Image: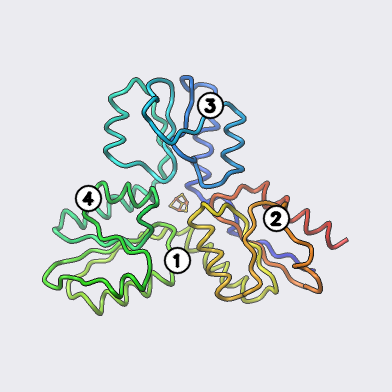
Amino acid sequence: MVITLAKTAGFCFGVKRAVEMVENSLGELPQPVRMYGYLVHNEEVVNKFIKKGIQVVNSLERVRSGTLIITAHGIDLETKAELQKRDLFILDTTCPLVKDAQTRACQLFNEGRQVIIFGDANHQEIKAINDRINQTAIILSSLGELNQFNFDLSKKYGLISQTTQNTQKFKQAKEMLRRKIKDIKIFDTICLATEERQNEARELAQKCEIILVVGSKTSANTTRLYEICLAINPQTYFIQTKNNLQIEWFKGVRSVGITAGASTPNWVIQDVIKELAKSKE
Ligand code: F3S
């Protein structure tokens, strides 16, 4: 059985940066240290930080002192302004590429365009972007929704996407909207890390008998990788750790491809490879 690991599997630049920012400053941060939501969408990474004494909070009501870590997905403006009034040290790990998507949305908004975001309305990244344009965005999460939406053709529009969006679906969305709307300006805000991972996953799914997508089901980019691979290869499995592997998947199989989300740590991927190697013996 040949095991091929995607070159792009694992931490992207933004996640690596966020994790290192916390690790490198942990000893010097005012106590207690809390993170607002998961630093990155991966339970293994977050549990490691919890063991080091960092608390995860989902409400900011009682957070009045110490350090608050803002996650790689960014934060909405109202919350940010509220936090700045408190006696808190803020460690903001927002990915620069998420900030870039926010800037692009503001640019379109300031040009008098109705902003359309192709992404998940419940995702923190999208909430933070929408907040910067006074919550005026039309947020569409699928090609079906986009196709059915009744656009006012007298308006000027602007389109951006979630940074972890499916590149092929966004391409279709762009084509669809260019046909429907006369005046539309488009910024492709899918980050390069996402694009590279998705392209490599497509190649792997075509050439391997089985695909393992490693990462958390709460991670948007890992879920996209799973959807992409599954559409090409029905023998695609979404696993969080080596513990989810099932021996019967591999009976008679000669090639396994492994990819992993941008928030999946290398040690989790290596554990999966070691476990698979054991089953070959
Ligand atoms: Fe940033 Fe892209 Fe990673 S937006 S957090 S580099 S998936």
Residue 6 shows up from this direction: no
Q: Earlier in the sequence, mark 3 or mark 4?
A: 3
Q: Report how far apart the C-alphas of labels 1 and 2 lie in the structure.
A: 25 Å
Q: Which residue is mark 1?
A: 166
Q: Report how far apart the C-alphas of labels 4 and 1 lie in the structure.
A: 24 Å
Going by the numbered disc 4, the residue's amino acid type is: Ile
Q: Which residue is mark 4?
A: 133
Q: Are marks 4 and 1 in contact (CB under 8 Å)?
A: no
In the rendered image, which quarter contains the N terminus? Answer: bottom right
Which residue is located at x 56 percent, y 64 percent?
A: 226
Going by the numbered disc 1, the residue's amino acid type is: Asn
Q: Say which quarter of the image contains residue 152.
A: bottom left
Which residue is located at x 81 percent, y 58 percent?
A: 277
Q: Is residue 89 above or below residue 193?
A: above
Instruction: Sort mark 3 into few (<14), some (14-19) or many (20+) by Cα contacts within 10 Å.
Output: some
Going by the numbered disc 3, the residue's amino acid type is: Leu
Q: Earlier in the sequence, mark 1 or mark 2?
A: 1
Along the horizontal axis of the image, is 157 left or right of 39? left
Instruction: Sort mark 4 into few (<14), some (14-19) or many (20+) by Cα contacts within 10 Å.
Output: some
Which residue is located at x 38 percent, y 43 percent?
A: 74
Q: Report how far apart the C-alphas of labels 2 and 3 lie in the structure.
A: 32 Å
Q: Are marks 1 and 2 in contact (CB under 8 Å)?
A: no
Q: Are marks 3 and 4 in contact (CB under 8 Å)?
A: no
Q: Which residue is mark 3?
A: 26
Instruction: State the residue lying farthest toward the bottom.
Output: 179
Q: Which residue is mark 2?
A: 244
Q: Give x and y (percent) for residue 90.
A: 39, 29
Mark 1 vs mark 2, foreground winner is 2
Dot 3 falls on a residue whose secondary structure is: helix
Residue 34 shows up from this direction: yes
In the rendered image, which quarter contains the C terminus? Answer: bottom right
